[in-house]
Image (tube, rainbow, N blue to C red):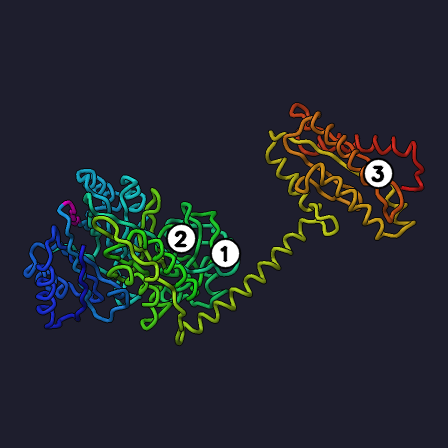
Amino acid sequence: MKQMQVAFRAGDDSLKEVLSKIRQWSRNYLGSAVMIQIFTEVLDEKEITRVISKIKEWMPEAIVFGCSSNGNILNGDFSGGSFVLVCSLFEYPSTRIETLAYRYGENDLTTVAEKLCEEVKKRPWVKGVQLLSTIRGMSMTELCDGLSLLPEEIQVFGGAAFTANLEDDEACVFANQEYLESGIVFLLMGGDELHIQTQFVTGWKPLGSYLHVTKADGVFLKELNHRPAYDIYYKYLHIRNDEHFFHNTLEFPFLYRHKDIDIMRAPTASNPDGSLTMTSDMEENVQARIAYGDPWTILKTTYEAAEKMLPFAPEGITVFSCAGRRTFWGNREVGKETEVYQRLAPTSGFYTAGEFLRTGKDVNQHNVTQVIAAIREGDARPVPAEMIRQEEQSFEGKVSMINRMATFIKATTEELEEANRKLQELAVKDVLTGVWNKNAYFSKINEINESPDCAFAVAIFDMNGLKGINDTFGHECGDHAICDAVKALKDVFGTDNLYRIGGDEFIAVVDQADHQKMTGFFSLLDQKIEEINREDHDYQRPLSLSKGFAVFIPASDHEYMDTFRRADEAMYNNKADYYRTHDRRKR
């Protein structure tokens, strides 16, 4: 596979010269197929069809397709030209390419996916499907679900058409002489010697706490934490609900887990009722976080992507990169995140309104993401690892400021998360002993009561003689005695099953325990207490626990407290036996 990339401006008289150069170049090689992709910032049907007609006039054998874009990638860098032409020459006779185009309106998304699957079934040579689509104001979930039905070994990847103006809803896709303002173009690729590798990278990092999606309906994200979804953007980022909302939120998408991958979703509009129109559906009852870009993390992920491509040794790379990434970096810096791919192979692409990629069996729509498709014919030719060694980067202007702010955010977020972790632990852990406290115990009771068929046992413990230790030797010695008792309990029942519900009162709740097992535990506990009592202690008295247990009986125990009452009664009977042989004044 050979590739040539050129750029020119709309209405430029140099088109004839460009095509002459491409034709002459292609004739220097023996090829089985010629493919020309066009990415253009110009949304002008007459100019686009003029360019296509000229290409077909000069190279009638070429398959021509493309879309409007928010900007183009040429030789791994941002291209300021309004048109980019990428001519790929396939060299192996077995390699085959073909385009299909469908107009929306005549076909709904499910129908489009079904038709595509039928066409692929007729072409067993297909290994990959590249798609270019108009999407503004549409939910692409049905299309993604439908394309997921393609045989799992077929790669699916692509991007959504856009325009240079972020606020513009119009876009176009085209294949050969067919120009669609609302539609989709598929490129089918395959053959014995054609190989495709795809992946996606983000580099965006979560910011702040998790937000619960409490109400959503398709592309409409209605509530987060039971409040209008827009409130989050105003509260944390002071982004207003006006005509600039889409542009201002592009760099701050939601990050959440979807079909076993981390995925980002960007809002396209804020509505009068406070709901957000998203680029794709979001499910209810998922946890999402606002994300932000960190230049160093972004570059690290792109270099990691390049490392994955090293063994594959691509001959051509297409990047479908979200327009939000171009907004984030700015035109001067955005090439930093794509230039590493050019070191491996000729790299082209465009800035999109959304990105598509199959991961596993599922086709997903992405936002604020790079989708990378690497293509090769024949056997891999090793590429030296030194080609993609990451070098020290310097940033300018806005990106330099973002980089410093990202460092600050990372440090403060880690501090807040650690503080929050400690607060959460304090809420459910006993400070002195490290076992669960009464709050955690009540949660456990609720959990058991919500699962009435679960098997469990309850053991209750009360220290004997703790008041005498406190009165005689002081509360510090009393604390030492409590900790020694807990050590014995932990050794037998484990930390996760123990709860301190009072000064010297403890409960163990043991799942899947029967009478024989609990009897064994109590016997082992006696041994552990004896071992402690053979040591010297500042409280100078034998450690002793009153104890009792009960096993849940499904026929008669209707709730947790029924079992608890029998365990409590057993513990008090044991305590009564203890005080029949010990002085109550040492209690």
In front: 458, or 203? 203
As measured in the structure, the alpha-carbon distance from the residue carrying label 1 to the one carrying label 3 is 54 Å
Q: Residue at x 40, y 55 (%)?
A: 264
Pointer 3: what residue?
Answer: 544
Residues under labels 3 and 2: Cα distance?
56 Å
Q: Amino acid at mark 1?
A: Arg
Residue 307 placement (x, y as % from top left): 36, 56
Q: Is residue 135 in view?
A: yes
Query: Where's residue 550, x and y in %?
Result: 73, 29
Residue 442 image position (x, y, % from top left): 67, 42
Disc with the residue nearer the chain's start (1 vs 3) = 1
Magenta stretch bounds: 94-100
Residue 351 appears in the rendering: no
Look at label 2 and name its amino acid.
Ile
Confirm or deny contact between disc 2 and disc 1 (CB under 8 A).
Answer: no
Q: Residue at x 31, y 71 (%)?
A: 331
Q: Which residue is mark 2?
A: 263
According to the picture, the residue beneath numbered tag 1 turns out to be 227
